[in-house]
């Protein structure tokens, strides 16, 4: 059975189970960027307790063209706990400070990435890879034709 199409808006992919499982704030902050015809849509959620000093976030990004959220990518992140099974062409990378980890993969009609941000140099890619694994089935149906 083919997955249903999704809107292409990264804020539309969560549901109560994903919010609970990943300790996300219930409302994501929409954002994105544009570079000529290349547009990246994003949605960012706070992760964990809603306290003033909690700056942990999880971002889902989507575009029809390939992109990278981390400009200063290091060698691929490899760990027994980073699972990328079922994600076409998936890879996980940390930034130089190791306070961000990007997991990116190919979708049927574009590219998706999850950015795990852990201030203090502790981004392990484990949470980001789990979030990507849980989101992948929702993105597998592609976006509706326009």
Image (tube, rainbow, N blue to C red):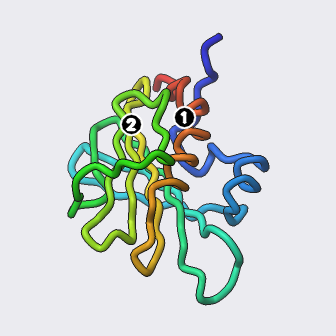
Kindly indicate the quadrant of the structure image that contains residue 138: top right
**What residue is pinned by disc 2?**
105
Kindly indicate the quadrant of the structure image that contains residue 115: bottom left
What x and y, as percent, mark residue 48?
A: 67, 71
Using a 10 Å C-alpha cutoff, classify the residue at mark 1 as few (fewer than 14 neighbours), some (14 to 19) or many (20 or more): some
Q: Residue furthest top?
A: 1
Q: Of residues 4 and 71, which is closer to you in this image?
A: 71
Kindly indicate the quadrant of the structure image that contains residue 27: bottom right
Where's the N terminus, which quadrant? top right
**What residue is pinned by disc 1?**
136
Residue displayed at 37% across by 36% down: 90
* Relative to 118, residue 60 above or below: above
> Does the residue at mark 1 contact the one at mark 2 (Cβ under 8 Å)?
yes
Tell me, for residue 18, which label it has, or none.
Answer: none
Residue displayed at 48% across by 31% down: 85
What x and y, as percent, mark residue 136?
A: 54, 34
């Amino acid at each position: 059975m083919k997955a249903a199409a999704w809107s292409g808006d990264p804020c539309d992919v969560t549901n109560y189970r994903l919010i609970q499982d990943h300790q996300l704030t219930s409302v994501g902050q929409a954002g994105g960027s544009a570079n000529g015809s290349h547009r990246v849509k994003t949605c960012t959620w706070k992760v964990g307790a809603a306290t003033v000093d909690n700056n942990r976030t999880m971002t889902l990004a989507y575009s029809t063209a390939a992109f990278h959220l981390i400009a200063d990518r290091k060698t691929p992140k490899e760990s027994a706990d980073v699972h990328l099974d079922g994600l076409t062409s998936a890879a996980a990378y940390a930034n130089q400070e190791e306070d961000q980890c990007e997991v990116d993969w190919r979708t049927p009609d574009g590219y998706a990435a999850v950015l795990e941000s852990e201030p203090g140099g502790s981004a392990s890619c484990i949470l980001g890879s789990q979030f990507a694994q849980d989101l992948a089935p929702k993105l597998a149906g592609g976006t509706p034709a326009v």
